[in-house]
Amino acid sequence: MDKIIVLDFGSQYSHLICRRIRETNVYCELLPYNTPTKILRELNPKGVIFSGGPASIYSKDSPKPDEEIFEMNIPILGICYGHQIIVDNFGGKVKKSDKREYGHADLIIDDNYDLFHDINDKMICWMSHGDAAEKLPSDFKILAHTKNSFSAAIGNKQKKIYGIQFHPEVVHTQRGLEILRNFSQKISGAKPEWNMQDFIKTVIADVRNQVKDEKILCAVSGGIDSTVVAVLLHKAVGENLRCVFINHGLLRQDEDKLVVKLFQDHLNIRIIYADVQTQFLRRLEGIKDPERKRKIIGEEFANAFINVAKEHGPFKYLAQGTLYPDVIESGVSKGPASLIKTHHNVGGLPKWLNLRIIEPLSSLYKDEVRKVGSLLGIPNELLLRHPFPGPGLAVRIIGEITAMKLGITKQASSIVEEELKNSGLYHKVWQAYAAVGDDKAVGILGDERVYGYVVTVRVVESIDAMTADWARLPYHVIENISTRITNEVENVTWVTYAVSSKPPATIEPQ
């Protein structure tokens, strides 16, 4: 399959570049900026993209790619910092700009032959840079400019090497997807062969080939990732799959009843129900550090899997819904046919877990998983649910997990979701929940002065969770949520609304 490689120089948008290329139906992988050319040759990409990054090319230790990459004779596109790498490598000069550009800018296109093919003479682009080219390499031509950047896009058409100072991958840039499509297909010649129908066929065939007659234990949570994994594996191995739902006591309200019912009634997949709330919550008593909580939860999950395996096994494999952004850790990502790993460090699972990990979705982004789920016929009741973290409400309870804080988080989060559904906004946002920590504030309930918890409501809009913006909910919706939480949830006096976007914040508080 034809592919494009994105080299990551530290941009917050590196994954986004990769995902946008995939939207054009061209397979794309993300690798570290210093990936040796030898490895790139083995991968045989049709083109390479240099991402942006926070460094300045003229700094002493600025990150640079393997120099031999420019001798591969394949198309290269540099974005922002990647643009500066190209200018510097071919004899140009980059300096700190007197007029930095951040945010929207009018891009005037001077040459719309290839990179800007079928794009008008003017468009809005998204800038984010404090450095700029002072002198261009002699064999490069200006393709576009802005008011403050005379070389917002440059190119050497003979060598098929291009640099753009703006970010085509973000939604703020008009027709950015077309620019990436022009590079990946028109300039690089990559065939648009990446689609989810073929992905499903490939995964099913590969699982059958690798697992053969062995049994797979699949942990399901009710989230879209684990649900898609379960349906895929059920199609691949049938009754050799056993799904287990671990009730660790950190679930959304009535989650256990909903998940079991949906799997049995809608998906026709048998599910093992393991109630281990007592063990989980007992081990979490007194623990405040979020990383420690995650590790404990990972260990207890492993204990639960071992116990289920003893009773219902033997099993050789444990399936998980790990996605592509989680596995960019070894420096060389795997393609869709490489499914089984002998180790896994996502989610805090301990090394002593004596099951081989199988991760059918490890080459996909979240929006691709939803497409797979839709093709597999998963009902919208499961498919369109908001994402829910693997450690559950533990990441939404700041500080020690107590019975009171757990009850507050469950009830308050349920109210948030109910009010969004009542207002028709639930499916228009990415994620919504309520969190609680140890902060308290004075309130008045009736005629009594009380000291209760502060609940933080978090609602974000996103496409893939790599970036997210806080949702500008109508005031009456926020008011209804606040009123219901303070009226219906005991020991709560204040409700706040989180207005930080990702980055710099994260979607979950821990």
Image (spheres, helix red, strand yellow):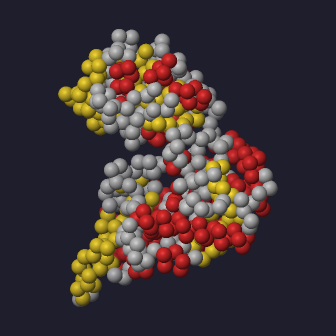
**Residue, far front:** 352
Left or right of residue 341, residue 398 in this image: left
In the foreground, 257 or 475 = 257
Rendering coords of residue 329 (x, y %):
50, 45
User: Where's the N terminus, which quadrant?
Assistant: top right
Picture quadrant where residue 494 is located: bottom left
Identify the residue shown where x is 38% and y is 61%. Answer: 509
Picture quadrant where residue 54 is located: top left
Identify whether 129 is placed above or below 111.
below
Rendering coords of residue 367 (x, y %):
54, 48
Identify the residue shown where x is 42% and y is 62%. Answer: 291
Rendering coords of residue 311 (x, y %):
72, 73
User: Where's the C terminus, which quadrant?
Assistant: bottom left
Left or right of residue 280, residue 131 in this image: left
In the foreground, 128 or 416 = 128
**Residue, far bottom:** 447
Labels in figure, total? 0
In the foreground, 344 or 404 = 344
**Residue, far left:** 98
Identify the residue shown where x is 28% and y is 16%. Answer: 135
Picture quadrant where residue 244 is located: bottom right
Identify whether 233 is placed above or below 68.
below
Identify the residue shown where x is 43% and y is 15%. Answer: 156
Q: Is residue 104 visible?
A: no
Q: Is residue 5 visible?
A: yes
Rendering coords of residue 446 (x, y %):
27, 87
